[in-house]
Image (cartoon, rainbow, N blue to C red):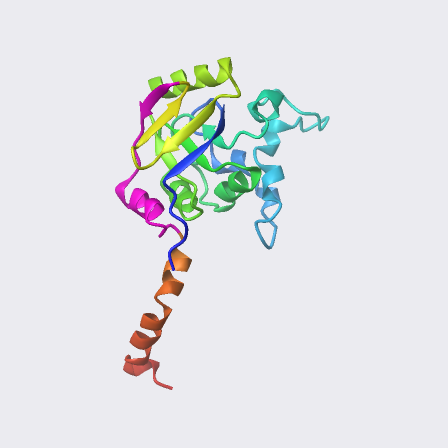
Amino acid sequence: MPLDPVTQVSGRAVFIPGADIDTDRIIPARFMKCVTFDGLGEFAFYDVRFNSETGEKTDHPLNDPRFEGASILLAGENFGCGSSREHAPQSLKKFGFNGVVAESFAEIFFGNSITLGMPCVIASSEDIRAIAALIESDPAAVLTLDLTEKKISIADTDFPVTIADHAHEALVSGKWDAIADLLEGLDAVKSRANALPYMAA
């Protein structure tokens, strides 16, 4: 059966500046030895959030108490590039993020995020800078990502966003989890398999 449609995501936002933020920065490889994804959230951006020698927190935006609890991440171009580890979007989701806005995304990261029901939308660099400025001036401001209208609203201002048609359709129709979609058609799969001569026992 279809999952809950994802048509709108709202929450406070945090801006993580920089282009080409790769999956190893999002979740360092040494934390990928887990059997499940539970607990990955605490290691998101670990190597830039903590000093490797002292273990103390750095001045990374995710350590800024003004942005504690932010659930929408704002970033630059080519976000999620590098190795195709699904742990990267999983760690962001476990950290508490429900959506990502960037200038562009690495394709595999984008796909892995959509299968979590975590929309990744594209905004222009100018609009991202403007949104970041609004967040900086008022960290408590609520940002609403509206997939139906394909826009971001914050501080009485709207900004257009884009998202690939297939991802948009998957999210708003509740068909964003491929495994759940497959299980929904399990009877048809079994029927087709039984009709294949080479599947006969």
Nearer to us in this view, 3 or 22: 3
Q: Quadrant of residue 111?
A: top left
Extreme residue toward the front, this view: 156
Q: Is residue 161 magenta?
A: yes
Nearer to us in this view, 122 or 85: 122
Q: Quadrant of the N terminus?
A: bottom left
Spot occupied by residue 138 in the image (x, y as percentages of width and height): 50, 16
Spot occupied by residue 31 in the image (x, y as percentages of width and height): 61, 43
Residue 79 appears in the figure = no
State how many labels appear. Answer: 0
Residue 192 appears in the figure = yes
The structure residue drawn at horizontal position 38% and vertical position 50%, both measured from the top left corner, is: 176
The structure residue drawn at horizontal position 30% and vertical position 32%, both measured from the top left corner, is: 150
Q: Quadrant of residue 157?
A: top left
159 is higher (above) or lower (below) than 41: above
Q: Is residue 23 left or right of residue 28?
A: left
Q: Quadrant of residue 164?
A: top left
112 is higher (above) or lower (below) than 24: below
Q: Is residue 182 left or right of residue 41?
A: left
Spot occupied by residue 27 in the image (x, y as percentages of width and height): 55, 38
Nearer to us in this view, 20 or 170: 170
Q: Is residue 158 magenta?
A: yes
Q: Is residue 195 left or right of residue 20?
A: left
12 is higher (above) or lower (below) than 38: above
Extreme residue toward the bottom, this view: 201
Q: Quadrant of the C terminus?
A: bottom left
The magenta segment: 156-176
The structure residue drawn at horizontal position 38% and vertical position 47%, both measured from the top left corner, is: 5
Spot occupied by residue 132 in the image (x, y as percentages of width and height): 44, 18
